[in-house]
Amino acid sequence: MKNFYITTPIYYVNAKPHLGHAYTTIVADSLSRFHKTLGDNTMFLTGTDEHGDKIVKAAEKQGVSPKEFVDGISGLFQQLWPHLGIENDAFVRTTDEDHKARVQRFLQQVYDAGDIYFGEFGGHYCYGCERFYTEKELENGLCPQHLTKPEFISEKNYFFRMSKYLPWLREYIESHPDFIRPERYRNEVLSMLESGALEDLCISRPKSRLTWGIELPFDKDYVCYVWFDALLNYISALGWPDGEKYKTFWPGEHLVAKDILKPHAVFWPTMLKAAGLPVYQHLNVHGYWLVRDTKMSKSLGNVVEPLEMRQKYGLDAFRYFLLREMHFGSDASFSEEGMVSRINADLANDLGNLFSRVLSMTAKYFESRVPRPGEFSEDDKAIVELCATAMSNYIQLFGNTQFAQGLDSLWELVRALNKYVDSQAPWTLFKQGDTTRLGTVMYVLLSAMRKVALCLWAVMPDASRTLLEQLGQQPGEGPVTTSLEAEAGNFDGLQPGTEVAASSNLFPRIDVKALQQEDPAGKAPKAKKEKKQESPKAAPAAEGRNGEISFDQFKAVEMRAGTVVVAEKHPNADRILRLEIDFDEGQPRQILSGLADYYTPEELVGKQVIAVLNLAPRKIRGLMSNGMVLTAEKDGKLSVLTPAAPVPNGSQIA
Ligand code: MSP
């Protein structure tokens, strides 16, 4: 059994998780699942990075202690992941005592070996980056990341003799072409190394300036530089130096975006080398998600909330879109329109349609039992061959972080299967009474569909399981297969006689016209599925004469109880309050409500309210509202509805 260890960056806790964090973590999860389907022994680590100036500043801004602050946001990350189908094996926090002790041990080891020294240093310090810049690294005297003027700070500090290991690093990267991949990032690192701008690394901060960090074991007046501390999470979480997990899983695979290339490609391998530890296997670097070609930022108000996407489009579709749309290594642009077209084309038209037509034909022609195949024709053999090629390409590409290409190769098969349905025309075979040929065609289709569903577990775990169940399989808990490579090499696995579902409607089309009508600017389209029972527009037929609504229509309104955790005035609207309400969804939901004339924000915090959650999100004066708080009104006075006795957050109102 092979071991596979995958990590994400540990995220800063100065902001709530957004699309970018979700992407890296979903990729790591898909890779971990993918390796499970190959039968590997896997370990998947994520976590939060909780030390440093930035955290202290953010905590100060909210008037809480750094500890209270980091507990809160780290909790948001930990709660979010299960909602995105993330199954990490461990979650590391840099404020964990265990992590701190291991960082100190590492520092002492490198110090004892003579690779950490004390020296006076004057440098250009950027508070945004929390690091010193050399003269050469500045662009026109400004920090190249933040375009702000760094402060010149001169103080005594501890330094890691990084420069001693740079020639080794350069040689290592040159002789291991895929150590940093894709290639463009490898080249970027090589030119960094050639530029001569890299020097020794300042790895301490005097406590007189910053106390929120790990104390240096050899000098109590200093704390450790946040990056030196953070990078060590990848081995501290494995129990370095003598933990079983460390022995089993190190060296592993790292997954990061291009923003943190340098610490991972330069600091980290030289740190490992200095401590005499093996370096990681690969640094897998991806690009940035942009929103309508601009950087996501809180101030621009274009931050994409992963939970909102999941709620609108479904988790499987969201995960599929992220992996299919971004070519690993390059930037990609996120838009809901893009997501809707991808879902409609790939999931509704191709995959969904295939399952829907083949299962309903099997119901009609073979009473929903997998037929026994006759002899394979040339056309059938071509499908068998394509199935094997598509799967082995998928396996190879996915394993190489080329997710979009891997999925595309699988879709070549899906599209070919739809064409095969058209060219073999089972309905004609049925009319002609050619049961043997009809049985063979249906068997070829069902068998290939099973293979597709097995491959998809890595990306769409729930959908994969449902599709397999529809094919009469019992995937159970855990990975749906542990022998994907063997599955690629045969066309077996589906027993004739197995009972399959009579229909499938896993990925209904999303009505683009309805989206545009609802929001002509196309800014916040609400996915309205064409499935009748889910579409409020399909309702009038059921509407009674006196404006009555059907029971199904009432049921379609999702109302839940939740506790207000934040209440404040809307910055651009006097009568509106901005609420953050905890419905036990992993992170609080923002709802705007015209309550400012009736309640002070303080009166609402801690109160349980009832809200409609499946209302189309609306932007009100620049802020998104994701639901509606229910109120009772009499003579123009509003009063919020609240349960008679406290109920668990998220309780459904019915
Ligand atoms: N704490 C450091 C990492 C320390 S690892 C030892 C850090 N944290 S972060 O919260 O800023 O996370 C950066 C990472 O979040 C990126 O490398 C990437 O994985 C993810 N993303 C954040 N924004 C992103 C996009 N817009 N697009 C894609 N991923 C991005 O840096």
Image (cartoon, rainbow, N blue to C red):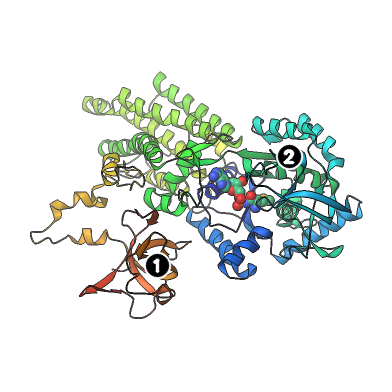
Amino acid tagged 1 = Gly
Residue corresponding to mark 2: 137
Of tags 2 and 1, the one toward the viewer is 2
Label 2 and label 1: CA atoms lie apart by 51 Å
Q: Residue at x 33, y 76 (%)?
A: 643
The crowd level at tag 2 (other Cα within 10 Å; few <14, some 14-19, many 20+) is some
Q: Nearer the viewer, residue 250 or 473?
A: 250
In the image, is the residue at mark 1 within 8 Å of ligand 1 by its beta carbon?
no
Q: Nearer the viewer, residue 311 or 59?
A: 59
Report the disc number at residue 82: none
Quarter placement of the C terminus:
bottom left
Snapshot quadrant of residue 589: bottom left
- Residue lying furthest top: 378
Query: Is residue 406 left or right of 211 when viewed as pictured?
Result: left
Sequence-wise, which precedes: disc 2 or disc 1?
Answer: 2
SS for dot 1? loop
Q: Verify CB contact (< 8 Å) between mark 2 and mark 1.
A: no
